Amino acid sequence: MIIKNVELAHVCGVTSTLPKDTFPQIAFAGRSNSGKSSLINALINRKALARTSSAPGKTRTINYYAVNDEFYLVDLPGYGFAKVSQAEKEAWGKLIERYLNKTAEIKSVFLLVDIRHAPSVLDKQMYDWLLSKDKEAVIIAAKADKIKRAQTEKQLKLIRETLNAGKNATIIPFSAETKAGKDELWEIIENRL
């Protein structure tokens, strides 16, 4: 995909109304600090359009990035271990659920998990929930540069088994550092759009 322009088009917090336009959307879900913002930056060849941080929980809103004035890449708030109150975590959860339930334009949800570890209980719940809502979930095994290449297949098998993802489920190892997996992700995005 040739990226001509990208801009942060909408930011929606817990009390915001979701945008009503009809751009197709590719959403990115995952735990806090799973690498969603880094993945978006890598896809659009920008260093810091999507804000990243070493501290979990930087993304606290739904951020819509308009690409080529044709579609959105949507960065959802992370779930899990961000150092915020339980009430704020619950509000984020409701915001994510509202977005996923109310947005008809979602073409695919990319679920990021850390390739170094088995997916968490929350990852499994998110994956199962997406499938129960008939949302196509593409699993991104992020931070692939953090393991040895020889470990990749073993870790992908662990992710598939832990999530109970069928043999036809798509799992792509990805690295925001090396851009490994970027072309495969764009191919999926273009097919869904």
Image: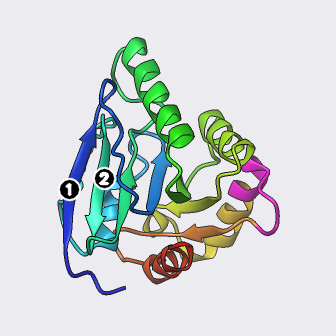
Q: Residue 177 appears at what percent x and percent y? A: 33, 70
Q: Residue at x 25, y 75 (%)?
A: 45
Q: Is residue 51 visible?
A: no
In the image, taking residue 65 as reference, residue 49 lies left or right, namely: left
Q: Amino acid at mark 2?
A: Tyr
Q: CA distance from mark 2 to mark 1?
A: 6 Å
Q: Residue at x 38, y 77 (%)?
A: 179
Query: Does residue 167 belong to the magenta stretch?
Result: yes
* SS state under label 1: strand
Give the class, few, some or many, for how many residues have Cα within 10 Å of label 2's Cα (few <14, many ≥20). Answer: many
Q: Which quadrant is home to the N terminus?
A: bottom left
Residue assigned mark 2: 64
Q: Amino acid at mark 1?
A: Leu
* Magenta highlight range: 159-168
Query: Does residue 183 belong to the magenta stretch?
Result: no
In the image, taking residue 177 as reference, residue 49 lies left or right, namely: left
Q: Residue at x 38, y 54 (%)?
A: 74
Do residues under tags 2 and 1 come within 8 Å of each other at their CB atoms? yes
Residue 145 sits in which quadrant? Answer: bottom left
Residue assigned mark 1: 8
